[in-house]
Structure formats: structure tokens, C-alpha cells
Amino acid sequence: MKIPRQLCLRREERWPALVALAVIVALNVLMVGKYYDVFAKNIHGGFWGMFTGKFHVSGYDPILYLVMSVWRVLFSGFRHPLLLWMLYPAACLNEWLMPIAGINCAQLITAAMLTVADFASFVLFHRLLRDVVGLCRADTALLTALFFSFAYVMVPMVVPDHFAFSLCLLLLTLYVCGRHMRDGTPLSAPAAALLMVVTAGVTLSNGVKVALGQWMANGRRFFAWRNLLVAVALPSALLLWAGFSVGGVPQPKTDADLQQENATLRKNNMPTHADHGGEPISTVGFMNWTDATTSRLDAAVENLFGESLQLHSDHLLGDVWIDRPVVVRYSLAANYVVEAALVLLFALGAWCGRRERFAWLCLSWFAVDMTLSMGLGFAINELYIMGPHWLFVMPISMAYAMLRAKGAALKALRVATGCLAAWLWAYNGTLFVGFMLG
């Protein structure tokens, strides 16, 4: 059987992809090794104890390990309406393997799934810059290296949460919509519906981005009633039904779960939710996850464009619900210089791409996330963990600056991008690998 052309690596992608795969596998091996004794040897239940006391990597949760160990709702069904069903085959595989292997294989299965998603994200991002933006090979390599050096692109590649899958699906959506924009062809309603179901099924807010993508690709045709019915209304109804079908909220914990959690809480003296969260705008429904009082300036400097891009060496990958303050300062002035340089290049790229529809699509996605995080304050106390939903907008915007620059200006941009990528790989890589080996 012939492999579809879209799934084959191009000649120019092979060496970069080989390097990327080596890094992805190495990081996932380190993550498995760090927590192997915790998860692999637990095959007798009481898995909630893993969730509260034994896995601490920033604000991420070991959702994939847990759901594959005991297939039940351990997250909000309304925020991740189809994630439980997407993980069902993997949970069945682990259930079959555990008595045969004598270990909980959730970690190994998760690492394999993440490796596939991470590698696909690399290829998709590379092709976005080449096929949609129209960047040359050298500049594509520089910006791809820069993107994957960002702290909260690197970390989600290996943590057992949903963010790596969300990143992959968002890049796929951007690529599909971008190709249609480039070719001047509409994105069909069934194709948009499929993207909506899969992408928003992992993270509900992604559905808005899929709708924006089809709107940018189709123009006025997006508002035709048939398209709105097939591409928006029906997928939304399916996602709503899926959210209700899994109860919308995590299922109650078992007695064994509660005993392990209570023991862990007493042992670690964990803080309550109020210790690290601002006051919500409202306590009704989804608005209970908002934040009206946390400083937006501190959040922007230290978390949004800080921790998302460069790890803080103090409270390294700490959890705000356990031992990390909401605001952590860098100990090196160089970190703030790098942050300012990245933000300035982002702004320059956004200005250079101001007449490009694809650039506007990317920036509209960024605006969605900023409305939720910086506006409503959704998860603002740890908004860096949401980085996979928007960080790709920065290097894509920078690509338009490279497209417009000539001569000495282009050389300066290339040198700056290369230096920033080298710094981030050395700085974030050293801290992250040290954390996993510690």
C-alpha cells in the first residue's frame, strides 16, 4: 500500500526531522525515567494519589497516566469534551498489558503518543513557514529552532497532559486553513466540521480558532446558513453532548483515592486554592475560573512573556498550588534582555505582516487567548502552561519580518534569531534536563 504523499517527509525535512526526533525521544525517556518508580509499579489502584502528591512538573497534571490507568473522568468534560473517548483505546491497551508485563504501561504508552504528536508538530510548523508563509529553508530552520526552544513548547512535549495534542491539532488547523488561503480555495464545511470536532474535542476554546480559520479562508461564504449549520452548529452540538455524556466534571474519588490524597495533603501541608488565586469575576459556572485581581503587568512580564519563553531558575517548574509564588523574578538581567528582544521581534513581525490574511488569522488566535487569560484572567496565575495554544504565533509573525527585510537588516534578523535560539536551548535545556535528572 502506498503511503499518502502528505505523510512522507520531504528531502529538505529529513535531517532536521531526524535531529528533532532524537531530541523528542531523549526528553520523553528522561520523563519516563524520572517517574518510573512512581507509576510503573502501581497496578493495584488508588491512582488518585499520583495526581495530588507524586507528580509535580509546573502546573501540569498527569491526566494521561491517570486515565490510562483507570478509565474514568478525571478532568472537566466541558473543557475537554472528547478527550476521554480519544484516550479509550490507549486505556484498553494498558489494561491488557498490565497483567502481562506486570507493570503499569501508562507511561510508556503516553511517551509513544507524545512522541508522535511532537514529531507531527515539528513537521507541521516547518511546513507552515515554508508552504504558507513562503520562507526560505535557512530562515525556516532558524525560526523552527527558536520555536522549539521556548520553555513551554519544550516542557509540554513530555508532560502527560493534553497540551502536546492541542498544539499539534492547532498547527494542523493553521496549515490547512493557510493552504486554502494561499491557493484561494474555500475550506469545505465537512472538513471544517472535522477540524472543529477533533481540535475542540481536546480543548473546547480551540473551536473558536477553527471557526476563525474557516472564516479567514472562506470570507463571506463562511456565513452561509448551510456552512454555519454543518461547520459550526452540528459540531458544537456534538461537543456539548459529549461534555454532558461524561458528566461535565470529574467523577467522585474512591475511598482509596481519598485516603491517599488526605495522607499526601497532611504530609506536604499543601495550600488551599485561595492561597494562590485572585478573586473571580463571578462564582457562577465558567466564570468561577476567572481572576479579576491578579496584577496583569506582573503576569505579562514574569509569566506570559517570561516563564512561557524562559524558565525561572528559582522555584524551577514549581506548582502555584503547592510551592511556587504566582510571581517569580529572574535572577539574571540577561533574562529580561532576551524577553524584551523576543517581544520586540514579535511586534516587528506583526507590523510587517499587517497586510497578510494569514498573519491576521494567527494574531486573531493570539487575541482569543489574551482575552481569556489577560482579560478574564482564566488560569492567569499559571498562564504559561497555556503557552502551547499561542506561542507559535510569535515565530510565525517574526517570519514576516524576515520576508520583508533585505541586505544588512535581514542578516541582523538572522543573527538575532540564531543567538536567541542558542541561548534558549542552552538555558531552558540545561534547567529542564537538570530538573528531570534531579
Image: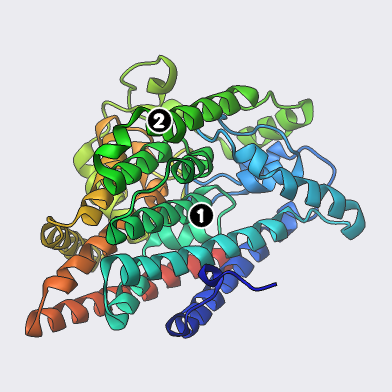
Question: Residue at point 38% right, 73% down?
Answer: 425
**Residue 320 or 32: which is nearer the viewer?**
32
Question: Which amino acid, mark 1?
Answer: Ala
Question: Which amino acid, mark 2?
Answer: Arg
Would you say 54 lies left or right of 100 here?
A: left
Q: Residue furthest top?
A: 284
Question: Residue at point 40% right, 56% down?
Answer: 176
On the image, numbered disc 2 is attached to which residue? 226
**Residue 188 or 159: which is nearer the viewer?**
188
On the image, numbered disc 1 is attached to which residue? 164
Question: Residue at point 83% right, 47% down?
Answer: 95
Would you say 115 lies left or right of 413 here?
A: right
Q: Which mark is residue 107?
A: none
Q: Position of residue 199 (x, y in %)?
A: 49, 44
Distance from label 1 to label 2 (Cα)? 33 Å
Secondary element under disc 2, as helix, strand or loop, is helix
User: In which quadrant of the rendered view does residue 268 lie?
Assistant: top right
- Can residue 263 be seen at all in this image of the molecule? yes
- Label located before the other in sequence (1 or 2): 1
